[in-house]
Image (cartoon, rainbow, N blue to C red):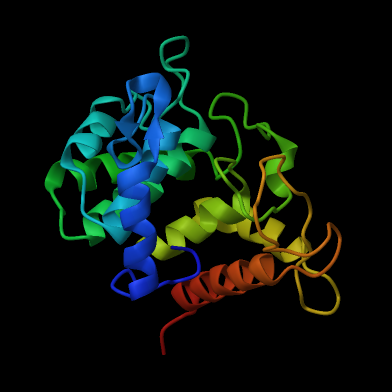
Amino acid sequence: MDLGLDPASDQARQMIDRVDRHLVFDWLDHRPFLHGETEPCINGKILGVGAYFKEPNEALADLLLSEQLADGGWNCEAAKSQRSSFHTTICVLKGLLAYERSGRKSAAVTGARKRGEEYLLERRMFRTLRTGQAIDKRWLRFAYPPFWHYDVLRGLDYLRNAGIEPDARVHEAIGIVLERAHQNGRWPLNLVHPEHVPLAMETEVGRASRWNTLRALRVLRWHETSTRPSK
C-alpha cells in the first residue's frame, strides 16, 4: 500500500491470493489472516490491507467501531484501560480510511473516524489532555517503516491523506517537523523500530531518509497550501 502498488496488477493479485489461502492465525483456530484477530491495532492494519488489495471486511470494520472508547480513540489494552492509545488509534484510523475509500462509506464509519481524528488534534498530536506534557518524546523522532508505532510525522501524514483542513492544533507539530530537517533540506532517519523487515527499505540511522523526506515535504506542502492567505 505505501509503495502504491496497483491492487489490480498481476503481482498484487498473486500476492493477496497467497495471503488469503495460506496465512492464518494458528492460535485462533486457523482463522484466515484477512478476517482479523483480537487487537484493534492489528485489525486496523488488516482492515486497510484487505480493503485495498481484496475486499472490504464489514464484520471487521463493525468490530473496530464497537471497540472505540469514550475519548474517541482505541487501545489494544482496553480491557485494562479506558484511556486510548495513540499507537492503536493511528492504526485503526488508517484502516477505516482505506475501508471508506474502497466504497464502504457510511455515517457510522465516518463519524468514528472523525472522533478518532479529534482525539489526536485535541492533544496537539503528542501531548496529554490533562497536563499538556509530551506523552513520549520518542514520538518527536521519525522512523520508517512505522509498523504499529505512532510518531508526530505519521500522525500529520495521516491527516493530510484524509483531507483534514489543518488548524492551530497542528502548528506545534508542524514546527517539530521543520526542526528535524537537516541543512541539506532532507530529513534523517531518527530511529529504527525493533520489528523485523525482510528487505532494506531505509538507510542507516542519522542519514538522509527518502521516506521521512517524502512524508515531511508533503505534510509541509499540505499545511502551507491550506494556511496560505487567499488572494
**Left or right: residue 160 compared with residue 141:** left
Which residue occupies 23% across, 39% down?
61
- Across and down, in percent, residue 32 comes to 31, 36
- Across and down, in percent, residue 177 comes to 68, 61
- Across and down, in percent, residue 11 comes to 39, 71
**Left or right: residue 186 compared with residue 49:** right
**Left or right: residue 178 compared with residue 121:** right
- Residue 23: image quadrant is top left
- Across and down, in percent, residue 25 comes to 39, 29
For the N terminus, which image quadrant? bottom left
Q: Which residue is more in the foreground, 111 or 24? A: 24
Which residue occupies 74% across, 68% down?
209
Which residue occupies 24% across, 32% down?
65
Q: Is residue 97 visible?
A: no
Q: Is residue 92 visible?
A: yes
Q: Please say if 27 is above or below 206.
A: above
Q: Which residue is more in the foreground, 125 or 215? A: 215
Q: Which residue is more in the foreground, 140 or 56? A: 56
Q: Which residue is more in the foreground, 58 or 163? A: 58
Q: How many marks?
A: 0
Which residue occupies 64% across, 67% down?
211
For the C terminus, which image quadrant? bottom left
Q: Please say if 152 is above or below 207.
A: above
In the image, farthest residue toward the bottom: 231
